[in-house]
Amino acid sequence: MTWKLSLFTVCAPWLPLPELAALASRQGLHGLDLTVRPHAFDPAKPFNFWGNNAATLDLARLGDLAVEARRALDQHQLSCPVLCSYLQASEVDAIRRVADAAKILGAPMVRVWTLGPRPGEARAQVAQAQREWQALAELAREYDLRFVLELHDRTITSSVSGALRLLDGLDPARVGVILDVANVANEGNEPLATGIDLLGPYLAHVQVKDITFTPAKTWNGIQGQFAPLGQGGIDWEHCLRLLRAAGYQGWLALEDFTRIERGPERIVDDAAWLRARIAVVDRVIPVAG
């Protein structure tokens, strides 16, 4: 079994979901990672990945929007592998609303955000998050889904080690980790092969984007910046080989925060680029089974 491909809607602000689903299907993608947050789209304003995105689901109207989104996905034979919220683990009532929407969408996973580190409070924040994720694991059992956190810079889970401090010992069928390779390269700074190995059954989803590094007055002397896929510093063929060797059979989600001026044509380019990288890996490491 090879990987299924999806598009994270936060990086595709130009089209409402019915049109975006049609485009994704035409490009051979298998799903959309749907974004949900408090949001009001204004077609009269410039498109923006986070601030004015035609495909983002507004949290306040999520119940109705989930029904409409499911209709658009079904029409084009697409899935929603993960419903991506920006809620903190402590926001249980709102998380329940997102979990209800995930059931409508048939989404097996819901992303929950993790805390931004506060100076001098990291240990206390980790302890708090450990308790909250224990509760989320129980809530996931109630809803028969999986709550996942993302490896993301400027959070207490910027690395695999940070994520496992929260999740280790919990049921990996109920909690897991979204591996964003570019985020880890930017801040997590752990060897990727080791990180994939350590995650084991907690590896739930993989996001595909690229970054370039420029000198900067930071703790390590560099600053990561978004780059078009294939034009940054991430060797994605190497990353895919590591995932294949580790037996990862989940989703690869396109997440490109560049060239917004290109419009939906950029999705066409990104999908073709990722398929080409996979084809190279398939020749080197054939798909098992």
Image (tube, rainbow, N blue to C red):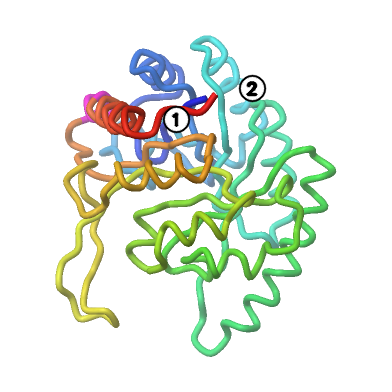
The residue wearing badge 2 is 67
Q: Residues within 10 Å of mark 2 (few under 14, many from 20)?
A: few
Please say whether residue 134 is one of the residues in the magenta stretch.
no
Q: Position of residue 111 (x, y in %)?
A: 59, 48
Which quadrant is home to the C terminus? top right
Label 1 – label 2 distance at C-alpha: 20 Å
**In the rendered image, the vertical position of residue 90 relative to residue 3, given as above or below:** below
Please say whether residue 264 is one of the residues in the magenta stretch.
yes
Region rendered in magenta: 263-268
- Left or right of 262: which side holds 279? right
Where disc 1 sits, the SS reads: strand
Where disc 2 sits, the SS reads: helix
Image point (21%, 49%), residue name: 227
Instruction: Name which of mark 1 and mark 2 comes first in the sequence.
Output: 1
Q: Position of residue 41 (x, y in %)?
A: 41, 36
**In the rendered image, the vertical position of residue 123 relative to residue 1, given as above or below:** below
The circle drawn on residue 6 is 1
Prevailing secondary structure of the magenta residues: helix
- Left or right of 70: which side holds 8? left
Q: Position of residue 52 (x, y in %)?
A: 36, 41
